[in-house]
Image: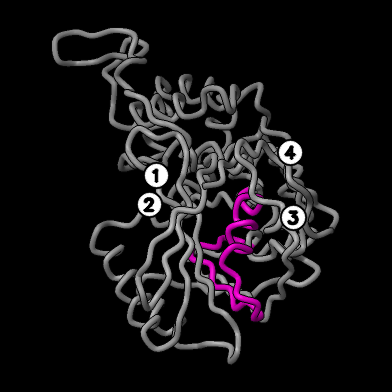
């Protein structure tokens, strides 16, 4: 997510303990839409406006069913999908709610939010280079979606201190404190790339590519262009995508090593949705596997009140933690530490 905001601050009226929007009591679902509007402010004017509009629309609650925090993202992705296939327009979302209610209800119920933001590779690259020890890399991404960030070595990168790699997709951003130039002179090879996700998306198919694009905020044209370019790169040689619960399946995945390779496990914006018990199980599996053979875990962390991630490297068997950088939620900027 991109920021936080008190949904109540956007409610236009109060009556005793009951809050109202457009003349009707504010439901829990409406609060989620108002909160999402705050998160979209400054990043997606279209989605911020639509979330405020939909918060007061009586047609939304039946489409959503039981209230859920990601309902706005699911519903807007469903509408975006209809727009992409020519069955709806952003100028009349209400018509989409009326004419395609059955489709949108199924989409919200069945499709998990998948935002495989390839710009995060721009922040991942220097972090991976900083922990690479010269051996070929055995990559395992948790919550990999379509695996776009598993092929980071096939992209080209620009930083204030220099460039790295080559390819049809060039990633750049605002490196407020740039990674050191010496780091960008390092080269590495990848022996294997695996991703595990509860709902992996196969972008080698047109349906998969459409589904993944539907979760990108439609007025963020740069993100859409990057996504399409990254899909073209992935289609040339897709990574291995595994359907599963990565907390449950991690021990078996960690047991399967490439001999002579350095195992790097990583995730971006995924573990924040785990509960305490799941996080404990995840770290226990990493610690246990790291005692048998060293490995490194790269993970993003978002603290309360922060509008950015911290990227941390945890090395096992020592358990040593090292904060490497701070980065924008979508990878637009980084601050090297």
What's the CA distance linking mark 2 and mark 1? 7 Å
Badge 4 element = loop
Query: What residue does disc 1 label?
Result: 302
Query: What residue does disc 4 label?
Result: 86
Query: What residue does disc 2 label?
Result: 272
What's the CA distance linking mark 2 and mark 4? 35 Å
Magenta highlight range: 120-147
Seen as rendered, the residue at the extreme front is: 182
Q: Residue at x 42, y 85 (%)?
A: 252
Percent of width and height locating residue 223: 69, 40
Front-most of residues 224 and 149: 149
- Mark 1 and mark 2 in contact (Cβ < 8 Å)? yes
Q: Residue at x 63, y 44 (%)?
A: 214
Badge 3 element = helix
- The answer to whether residue 221 is visible is yes
Mark 3 or 2, nearer chain start? 3
Badge 1 element = loop
Seen as rendered, the residue at the extreme bottom is: 259
Q: Is residue 161 above or below residue 196?
A: above
Q: Disc 1 or disc 3, which is closer to the eye?
A: 1
Badge 2 element = helix
Magenta region includes residue 144: yes
Q: Residue at x 14, y 9 (%)?
A: 16
Q: How dense is the environment of label 3, judged by Cα within 10 Å: few (below 14), some, or many (20 and up)?
A: many
**Mark on residue 230?**
3
Mark 1 or 3, nearer chain start? 3
What's the CA distance linking mark 3 and mark 2? 25 Å
Mark 2 or 4, nearer chain start? 4
């Amino acid at each position: 997510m991109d920021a936080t905001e008190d949904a109540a601050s956007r409610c236009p009226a109060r009556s005793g303990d009951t809050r109202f929007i457009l003349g009707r009591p504010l439901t829990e679902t409406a609060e989620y839409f108002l909160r999402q509007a705050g998160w979209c402010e400054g990043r997606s004017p279209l989605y911020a406006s639509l979330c405020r509009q939909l918060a007061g629309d009586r047609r939304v609650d039946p489409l959503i069913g039981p209230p859920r925090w990601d309902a706005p993202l699911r519903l807007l992705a469903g509408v975006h999908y209809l727009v992409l296939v020519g069955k709806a327009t952003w100028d009349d979302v209400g018509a989409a709610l009326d004419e395609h209610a059955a489709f949108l209800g199924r989409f919200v119920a069945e499709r998990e939010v998948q935002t495989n933001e390839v710009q995060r590779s721009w922040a991942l690259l220097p972090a991976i280079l900083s922990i690479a020890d010269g051996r070929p890399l055995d990559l395992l991404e948790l919550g990999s979606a379509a695996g776009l960030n598993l092929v980071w070595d096939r992209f080209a990168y620009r930083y204030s201190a220099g460039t790295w790699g080559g390819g049809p997709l060039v990633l750049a951003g605002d490196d407020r404190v740039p990674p050191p130039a010496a780091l960008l002179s390092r080269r590495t090879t990848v022996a294997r790339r695996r991703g595990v996700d509860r709902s992996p998306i196969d972008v080698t198919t047109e349906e998969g590519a459409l589904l993944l694009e539907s979760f990108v905020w439609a007025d963020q044209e740069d993100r859409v262009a990057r996504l399409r370019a990254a899909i073209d790169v992935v289609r040339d040689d897709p990574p291995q995508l595994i359907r599963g619960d990565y907390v449950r399946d991690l021990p078996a995945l960690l047991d399967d090593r490439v001999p002579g390779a350095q195992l790097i496990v990583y995730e971006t914006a995924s573990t924040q949705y785990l509960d305490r018990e799941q996080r404990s199980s995840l770290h226990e599996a990493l610690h246990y596997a790291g005692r048998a053979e060293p490995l490194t875990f790269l993970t993003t962390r978002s603290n309360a009140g922060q509008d950015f991630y911290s990227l941390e490297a945890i090395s096992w068997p020592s358990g040593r933690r090292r904060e490497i950088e701070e980065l924008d939620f979508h990878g637009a900027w980084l601050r090297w530490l």
